[in-house]
Amino acid sequence: MKKLIILSISLCLLLGLNVKGQFLKNIFKSYYVKGVVVLKNGDTLRGDINFSNSSSDYQFLVMRDTLNKEKLRYHPQDLSYFQIDSMFFYPKLLKRDSVFMQLLLNDSLKIYKYRYLVTTGYYTATETSFVFEKPDGTNLQVLSSKLFPFKKRVGEFFKDDPELSEKILNKTYRYDDLYVIANEYNAWLKKKK
């Protein structure tokens, strides 16, 4: 009976380690996809880009040369942009760091997506934020956190369009309305010209 119990426990441990091993393998898996990198000097490189949409993909870029399989690492300050399928990523200065941001809306007012790692004493998680960028280059990072003062910060950012600012301040527009806000602001800019 003891042998059966020990055998059962051993089998469960082995299966558990295998499942955890597969789980960890999937978490740390590298995804190489075809892409284009444009360097600051204008050179265009084509190859396989290591991209899994994790927070590290927004800090640096690893590209594998398709001919010799050599891996090259690029930081945001090294590139003009990189492209994967129809997604474009541009280097942007956020606070004091240069990071890659995915361009979501390419109009007078642009919207970028940025993913970053949040670490507390209790957990580590990848968060997504969005960045509005006005034609003059001023920008605002909009966090998804409930602690982010959306109404105050976004309303203030768009104060040059009083009607839009008022809609944000009276909560007609909220976090889920980022594209609506951007489209209304872009329409306002076009009317203003």
Image: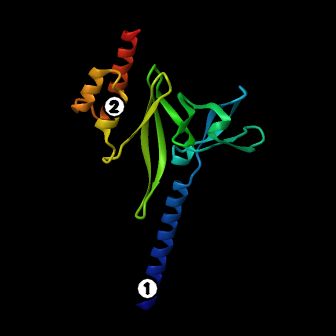
Quadrant for the C terminus, please.
Answer: top left
- Asked which secondary structure carries label 2, the reply is helix
Report the label total: 2
Q: In percent of the image, x 34 and y 33: which residue is there?
A: 154
- Mark 1–mark 2 Cα distance, whole angstroms, equals 69 Å
**Residue 122 bears which disc, if any?**
none
> Which mark sits nearer the N-terminus, 1 or 2?
1
- Asked which secondary structure carries label 1, the reply is helix
Residue identified by numbered label 2: 156
Quadrant for the N terminus, please.
Answer: bottom left
> Picture coordinates of residue 106 (x, y %)?
48, 23
Q: Is residue 34 left or right of residue 22?
A: right
Q: In percent of the image, x 61 and y 44: which residue is there?
A: 60
Contact flag, marks 1 and 2 (Cβ < 8 Å): no
**Residue 4 bears which disc, if any?**
1
Q: Is residue 56 left or right of residue 4?
A: right
Q: In the displayed image of the protein, which residue is found farthest to the right?
A: 68
Rendered position, 136 above or below 68: above
Q: Amino acid at mark 2?
A: Glu
Q: Amino acid at mark 1?
A: Leu
Q: In percent of the image, x 70 and y 41: which residue is there?
A: 64
Rendered position, 58 above or below 133: below
